[in-house]
């Protein structure tokens, strides 16, 4: 079966690992992001790792004009069209507190930008009657808390969007997976205090691919975050509001 | 954050360092670091001692710079960033007909680390060391990016192969892989009754891959007994992989003499007296320990030392005497190997020499370090040398005397890194840069 994947935010280490896993099973991959130099190197890397074809394409969540050309390119290929969304930005909450204007960019990067992209792609997926969307959210979207509630609320919005999209695409044989990673060992978390149980990006990518194969709806990765979040969500608001977790 | 302050160690866990580590994920980030604050690089820190440590200073973790830059299926030449691991190369290319020409006993070794220690594999006697198959490297040295190869910037190239990172940061390398008929190994295992059996078998074997396990606890007329492993690449089908295992916490099993004796007895008897032949997966043959994550925790919290020497062919008596001392001490862990080496080496500080190499693990204890000092002295007396990828205890003067090209190397390094930005704990301990 021929499969084409668009990876949004392809320079992130989770996306890189996921792209490699796809390449090793012979997929065609469009690596979308802003750092074209890194993406071009990544495309060569994926081709050497077995991708049928790998190409770097310019994507900027804040520039909707960059969306359609990517979709056109992907739609020129045969087989299923799939997308994996790894974009998002998380300015430190204290910077946001000083400069609330940062909220808008965070929401565009983490929610409305990718949602708009997926909305452009959805009709094509419906026409082809299949395909999978992987949407990477965050456990931060499960409950608003003092440390990162702007980012968290954007990811919560994205998760709700994905649930709706799932409801829509199911009708045409498509599928949507919401992925909620816990702490992942990436350049973003490197050296940040308070990280625990950090997961290797390659293990996260493995989990995502398994979820794709098994048509899961919502996964936490590593799996135990489901239970951690279950507990965190179970704390009554009256108590939670006084905590700093 | 770019820099993370952390405590870290080599594979043996006996030596540790504290310092700032950067782990760039993009070439551009690395370029910026190297321009602003050049620092020594490391790979997966599979070197046992302090080769990859820089206490109180900075170091660059290269493992996330792991892109394949090019692969030619017709020639088997692959170009890879320094952080690509050798097990990755094997997994990606074996089914397309190519394997890395040389791999050490762990697949976690990176391309950069394999070059910087000029590592050897079970085929050293037949196919040389890792550096013998490096076509060229891209090196950040003395503030700029330079290409070096056996024909271009020759001296720099020879100082970098086995040069423990002192000429600069290896960014990427072009490697000539070797053709393979399939993705498995045909392996023959033969029991060896004693030391003489070992030496006869290692000398007369004609296989491409040869190594032998030695029971470093066996005394008396069993001294030197072991199992010879001979292997060739094959197109036969290999069994499916076992599930990965992991050692969750530090426990001192391998530092326990009784455990080692019982384990060794079982390990020896596992192979029938008449020998046996089987097909194994590549990883199972080349990287047997890798399937147990954190296997080094089996030595407990204090860690361990690996002693590895090579002695020339005519010093076999000294090696036998060393082996007697090891077995009488009762200190050796079950992981001990003996191998015949060929003469090929790629760099001025490369370990290999024609002869026999012995590697034995010891727990990090006073009695063991005394024994290792004695073994170091005997190695020197035999005209042999110790391996920088394993060492954590040796003395600088002894090491320098073991490496005849040391002063040429030191001179080349002084040119390549005049500001001494690449100095590591090992270099300080052994005063390798004079
Ligand atoms: C279980 C086990 C089995 C082993 N078996 C063998 C064997 O059979 N044969 C053998 O030869 N060795 C063997 N080794 C040793 C191992 O192959 C070497 O230590 C190798 O260098 C490890 O690679 P690394 O990427 O972890 O390098 P590290 O240990 O991280 O670094 C090694 C050296 O290379 C330098 N370095 C690393 N990357 C770069 C770079 N990009 N640029 C410049 N310098 C760099 C470091 O500064 C350091 O001096 C074994 C080790 C283990 C743990």
Image (tube, coloured by chain):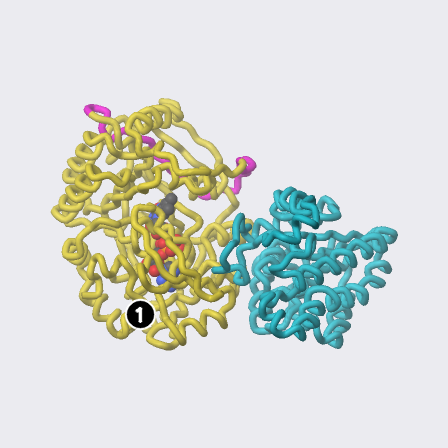
Chain colours: A cyan, B yellow
Quadrant hosting residue B155: bottom left
The residue that appears at 48% across and 63% down in the rendered structure is: B65
Find the magenta span and give its range: B220-242
B234 is within the stretch colored magenta = yes
Give B174 or B337, whichever is nearer the viewer.
B337
Q: How many marks?
A: 1
Give B134 or A219, whichever is nearer the viewer.
A219
Please say if B313 is above or below B169.
Answer: above
> Residue A52, how many percent across, how many down?
66, 60
Quadrant hosting residue A61: bottom right
Query: Could you tell me which secondary element the residue under label 1 belongs to?
Result: loop
Side of B331 where A188 appears, left or right? right
Q: Chain of mark 1?
A: B
Which residue is the extreme one toward the left?
B381
Q: Which residue is mark 1?
A: B421
Q: Is residue A43 visible?
A: no
Side of B266 where A154 appears, left or right? right
Side of B6 where B428 appears, left or right? left
Q: Is mark 1 within 8 Å of ligand 1?
A: no
A129 is within the stretch colored magenta = no
> Residue B214, how many percent across, how many down?
29, 33
The residue that appears at 78% across and 67% down in the rendered structure is: A116
> Residue B244, how many percent across, how many down?
51, 39
The residue that appears at 30% across and 25% down in the rendered structure is: B258
The residue that appears at 19% across and 24% down in the rendered structure is: B220
> Residue A161, how many percent across, how many down?
78, 59
Please say if B377 is above or below B321.
Answer: below
């Amino acid at each position: 079966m021929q499969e084409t994947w668009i990876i949004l935010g392809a320079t992130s280490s989770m996306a890189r690992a996921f792209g490699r896993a796809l390449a090793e099973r012979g997929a065609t991959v469009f690596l979308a992001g802003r750092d074209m130099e890194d993406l071009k190197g990544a495309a060569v890397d994926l081709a050497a790792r077995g991708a049928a074809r790998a190409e770097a394409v310019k994507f900027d969540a804040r520039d909707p004009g960059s969306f359609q050309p990517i979709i056109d390119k992907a739609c020129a290929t045969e087989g299923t069209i799939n997308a994996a969304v790894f974009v998002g930005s998380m300015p430190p909450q204290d910077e946001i507190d000083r400069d609330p204007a940062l909220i808008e960019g965070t929401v565009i990067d983490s929610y409305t930008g990718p949602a708009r992209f997926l909305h452009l792609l959805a009709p094509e997926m419906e026409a082809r009657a299949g395909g999978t969307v992987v949407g990477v959210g965050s456990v931060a979207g499960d409950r608003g808390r003092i440390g990162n509630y702007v980012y968290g609320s954007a990811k919560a919005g994205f998760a709700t969007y994905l649930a709706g999209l799932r409801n829509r695409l199911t009708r045409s044989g498509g599928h949507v997976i919401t992925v909620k990673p816990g702490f992942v060992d990436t350049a973003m978390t490197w050296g940040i205090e308070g990280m625990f149980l950090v997961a290797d990006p390659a293990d996260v990518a493995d989990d995502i691919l398994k979820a794709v194969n098994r048509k899961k709806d919502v996964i936490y990765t590593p799996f135990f975050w489901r239970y951690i979040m279950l507990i965190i969500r179970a704390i009554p608001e009256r108590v939670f509001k006084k905590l700093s977790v | 954050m770019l820099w993370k302050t952390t405590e870290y160690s080599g594979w043996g866990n006996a030596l540790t360092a504290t310092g700032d580590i950067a782990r760039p994920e993009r070439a551009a980030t690395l370029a910026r670091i190297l321009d602003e604050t050049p620092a020594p690089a490391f790979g997966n820190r599979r070197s046992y001692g302090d080769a990859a440590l820089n206490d109180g200073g900075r170091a660059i973790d290269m493992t996330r710079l792991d892109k394949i830059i090019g692969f030619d299926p017709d020639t088997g030449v692959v170009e890879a960033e320094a952080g690509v691991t050798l097990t990755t190369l094997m997994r990606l290319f074996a089914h397309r007909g190519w394997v890395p020409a040389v791999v050490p006993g762990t697949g976690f070794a990176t391309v950069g680390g394999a070059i910087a220690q000029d590592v050897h594999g079970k085929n050293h006697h037949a196919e040389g060391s890792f550096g013998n198959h490096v076509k060229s490297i891209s090196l950040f040295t003395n503030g700029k990016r330079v290409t070096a190869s056996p024909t271009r910037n020759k001296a720099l190239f020879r100082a970098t192969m086995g040069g423990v990172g002192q000429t600069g940061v290896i960014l990427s390398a072009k490697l000539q892989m070797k053709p393979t008929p399939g993705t498995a190994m045909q392996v023959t295992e033969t029991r060896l009754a004693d030391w003489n059996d070992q030496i006869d078998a290692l000398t007369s074997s004609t296989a491409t891959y040869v190594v032998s396990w030695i029971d470093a606890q066996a005394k008396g007329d069993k001294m030197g007994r072991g199992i010879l492993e001979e292997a060739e690449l094959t197109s036969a089908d290999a069994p499916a992989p076992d599930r990965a295992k992991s050692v969750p916490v530090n426990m001192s099993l391998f530092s326990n003499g009784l455990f080692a004796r019982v384990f060794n007895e079982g390990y020896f008897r596992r192979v029938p007296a008449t020998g046996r032949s089987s097909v194994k997966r590549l990883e199972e043959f080349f990287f047997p320990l890798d399937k147990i994550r954190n296997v080094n925790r089996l030595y407990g919290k204090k860690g361990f030392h690996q002693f590895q020497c090579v002695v020339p062919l005519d010093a076999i008596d000294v090696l036998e005497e060393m082996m007697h001392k090891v077995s009488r001490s009762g200190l050796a862990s079950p992981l001990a190997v003996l191998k015949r080496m060929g003469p090929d080496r790629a760099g001025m500080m490369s370990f290999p020499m024609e002869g026999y190499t012995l590697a034995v693990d010891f727990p990090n204890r006073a009695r063991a370090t005394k024994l290792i000092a004695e073994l170091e002295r005997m190695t020197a007396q035999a005209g042999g040398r110790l391996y920088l990828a394993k060492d954590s205890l040796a003395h600088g003067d002894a090491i320098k005397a073991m490496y005849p090209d040391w002063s040429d190397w030191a001179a080349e390094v002084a040119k390549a890194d005049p500001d001494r930005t690449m100095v590591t704990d090992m270099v300080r301990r052994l005063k390798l840069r004079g």
